[in-house]
Image (cartoon, rainbow, N blue to C red):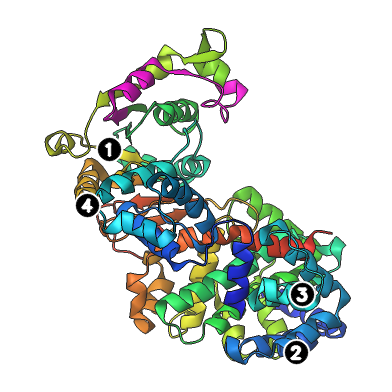
Amino acid sequence: MAELATARAVTGRDTEDLSDPAYLKIRDVIYRISGIYHPEEKLYLLASRCARRMRAVNAKTPSEYLDHLTVRGGREEELRLLLNEITIGETYMFRSQAQLEMLRSVILPQIIQTKSAIGFKRLRLWSAGCSTGEEPYTLAMFLLEESEKMLAGWTFDILATDLNDKSLAAAKAGIYGEYALRSTTEVLRKKYFRPYDGKQLEATNQLKSLIRFDRANLNDDSKMTFLKGMDVIFCCNVLIYFDQGSKHKVVQHFYSNLLPGGYLFLGHAESLYQVDDRFHLVHSPGAIGYWKPSIGYTGGGKP
Amino acid sequence: MNLHRLEEIRPKIGALEGMPAVPAIVLPLTAMLRLPPDQVDVDAVIELVSYDGTIAAHCLRMANSPLFGRRNTETVRSAVMVLGLKRIEAILLGCCLNRIVPPDKWALDPVTFWRHSLGCALVSSKMAKLIGYPDPDKAYLAGLLHDLGILVNTLACTENFRKCIHAARDGRVALHRSEEEHLGFTHCHSGKMLAEHWHFSGDVTDVIEFHHDIAALSGKPLVSLVHLSDLLCRLRDLGYGYYEAMGVDLAGEAAWATLVEHFPALTNLDLARLTMDIDGSMEDIVAIVDAVFKP
């Protein structure tokens, strides 16, 4: 009875009939392919995304649409289009506060401790799939602010790569409007940006100089092999477009790109489950990081 | 542990005896709801809900909230149908436990406390089902009540407990660490006293006493289960209302190893997916707690 009541209660919110088991199957297809997961309570979001694609392909029911995703011709293309719907929405700076907080209070102290011991005070971050640059600029501001605190005396560089030339050009230009800066405080805007063409702001040269922009295909083995010595890799909402095989390969590269004790961050609802079990899933309030164990780690308690 | 200081609060726990209705409603209700869903006497539940005007009003308000589509639910019966038994149970327990603490005594925000308890209950029963633990409902109850000692500390040593909370928040450390330092004992010790006083079952009492005691976990899968759920909740915005500076490899925890011994299926648990499930449940948890506490 409880389940019945719940199902009725949830369907009351939307026009889509969420009790249709086809939605659960679509959810699982999406999860298997992309690692993006819709919990029961967020199925209505998935349903509304599907609704748009269902209209486009003229599918009458969720189970007919499931066929479009699994058995009919053009299913890979349809999956890609649905993923586009699911990950829609431009990004903005300081979007993942919880990840930055984890970086500040958990990850950096560990790295500082390890690297200080050998007198190697250098930090390398990589924004893999940087799109139009919001993420690397956020990291640059974050590091510059910390360089007045716990990172005093450290040097750092940020590698920002993307496959898309247009996105990279925009990222290099570093010009942003109100949407991208919506979570950037007035203090940081004044410190790291200058006015550009009326309403927009342009990143200062100090900020730009910390970031090396480069075109890179994560599927390109020869390129991936040379990117060594990373402390933290951010790869948010990128792997979702890879099939299981190439995802596995890319994550293996990430593992060897990272130094022991380094971290990999994925997008908010993504997971590496059954992709690479050498990474340890590390929880911090509101964020999940994938940790490459330090040399000599044997489990037991906090990393 | 400072035994002397702990014993000081024992007489105060005795004085809780006269508090309204806690064991009287909670125990028969949880016993009733622990039956398989098809055997629960829904009429008896409805009667129990109707018996108390405040609780009935809370249920009705929640059934009519936006989360449930703002339908026009006018009777307790339809509210029970709309909400489902699990939510009704949570509202009832929330109301009952809330009544034992006068509003001016709360050191931890009651909304925060109850979200954490309810979150831990949901995660415990979810995880129990996923790994094949035979009694997910007991896991739910144990999760719900694991921090009972926080209520005891709130009532029995209000001012000192307030200091613990502030110190924990400022130092961004776990609450039980701060209690050890400032009280000499933790909510685990005081919670156990109240649990025994109320004649809770041995399993649930164990969870209340040992959920932060890594050394005492072995051979106690339920304690390990709730220990992990508690950690997971504190790592997903369902903690004590402040940011604890920690990064935890759950699969590297001692409790994980204990649980794997009893339930090998745990090694295949998709922890990331469970975490996202918890995030997805937030809306529901917030709604239930608001129904109880928001005037």
Horizontal arrangement in the rendering, residue B145 relative to residue B220 (left or right): right
Quote the CA–CA distance across marks 3 and 2.
21 Å
Q: Identify the residue at the far top of this view.
A: A197
Counting residues from the start of the chain, the first of labels 4 and 1 encountered is: 1
Give the residue type at disc 2: Ala
Callouts 4 and 1 on one subunit? yes
When asked about the image quadrant of residue A303, the answer is: bottom left
Query: Which type of secondary structure does the marked residue at label 3 adopt?
Result: helix
Check the picture and name the quadrant holding the C terminus of chain B. bottom right
Q: Which residue is mark 1?
A: A230
Quote the CA–CA distance across marks 2 and 4.
54 Å
Q: Which residue is mark 2?
A: B44
Give the residue type at disc 4: His
Query: Which type of secondary structure does the marked residue at label 1 adopt?
Result: strand
Quote the CA–CA distance across marks 1 and 2.
62 Å
B206 magenta-colored: no
Check the picture and name the quadrant holding the N terminus of chain B. bottom right
Give B69 or A190, whichever is nearer the viewer.
B69
Q: Which residue is mark 4?
A: A248
Could you tell me which chain the residue with mark 2 belongs to? B
Residue B242: x %, y % from top left? 63, 52
Horizontal arrangement in the rendering, residue B216 relative to residue B268 (left or right): right
Give the residues in magenta. Answer: A159-188
Quote the CA–CA distance across marks 4 and 1.
19 Å
For the residue carrying disc 3, how many other residues have a C-alpha within 10 Å: few (<14), some (14-19), or many (20+)?
some
Q: Which mark is residue A23?
A: none
In the image, is residue A299 above or below residue B194?
above
Q: Nearer the viewer, mark 1 or mark 2?
A: 2
Asked whether the residues under the numbered discs 3 and 2 touch, taking CB atoms below 8 Å apart as contact, a structural biologist would say no
